[in-house]
Image (cartoon, rainbow, N blue to C red):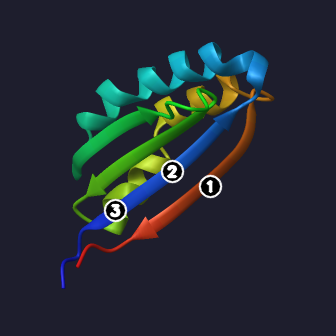
Amino acid sequence: MSNKLIIVARIEANPDKIELVKTELLKLIEPTLKEAGCIQYDLHQDNENPAVFVFYENWESRRLWQAHMNNTHLAEYMEATAGAVASFSLNEMTKF
C-alpha cells in the first residue's frame, strides 16, 4: 500500500461571498504546488451550485500535508475568508 495521501476538501461559500472565496482559494494554488510533498492540488467549482468548491489533493505523505496545513498562505486564506464560508469538510483518503 502507498504512503501517499489523498485529500478531498469541500468548501461551500456563503451565497453573497462566492467570488471572495473563489479568489482566495485560487491564491492557494501556486504556493501550495511549490511545497515539499505536493504532487497534485486541483481546485474545482460545482457546475450546479457555484458556491461549492472542491480541492483534490495528492501528497507524498501525511507528514508533508500536515506541514502544508501550518503554512502562512493557509492562515492568510482563513483570515481573508472569515465569516464567508458556510461549511467545510475534509476527507483523508487512500488510493487502492
Identify residue type, mark 1.
Ser
Name, please, the residue furthest toward the right. 83
Q: Quadrant of residue 31?
A: top left
The answer to whether residue 39 is visible is yes
Q: Residues within 10 Å of mark 1 (few under 14, many from 20)?
A: few
Q: Is residue 88 left or right of residue 56?
A: right
> Which residue in the structure is indicated by mark 2?
9
Counting from the top left corner in percent of width and height, residue 77 is at: 58, 28
Which residue occupies the foreground of this view, 42 or 78? 42
* CA distance for labels 2 and 3: 10 Å
Identify residue type, mark 2.
Ala
The answer to whether 37 is drawn above or below residue 75 in the figure is: below
Which residue occupies the foreground of this view, 52 or 33? 52
Would you say the residues marked 2 and 1 are in contact, meaning their CB atoms lie under 8 Å apart? yes
Counting from the top left corner in percent of width and height, residue 4 is at: 24, 68
* CA distance for labels 2 and 1: 6 Å
Please name the residue shown 48% across and 49% down the image: 69
Image mark for residue 89: 1
Counting from the top left corner in percent of width and height, residue 91 is at: 51, 64
The answer to whether residue 36 is visible is no
Identify residue type, mark 3.
Ile
> Which residue in the structure is indicated by mark 3?
6
* CA distance for labels 3 and 1: 14 Å
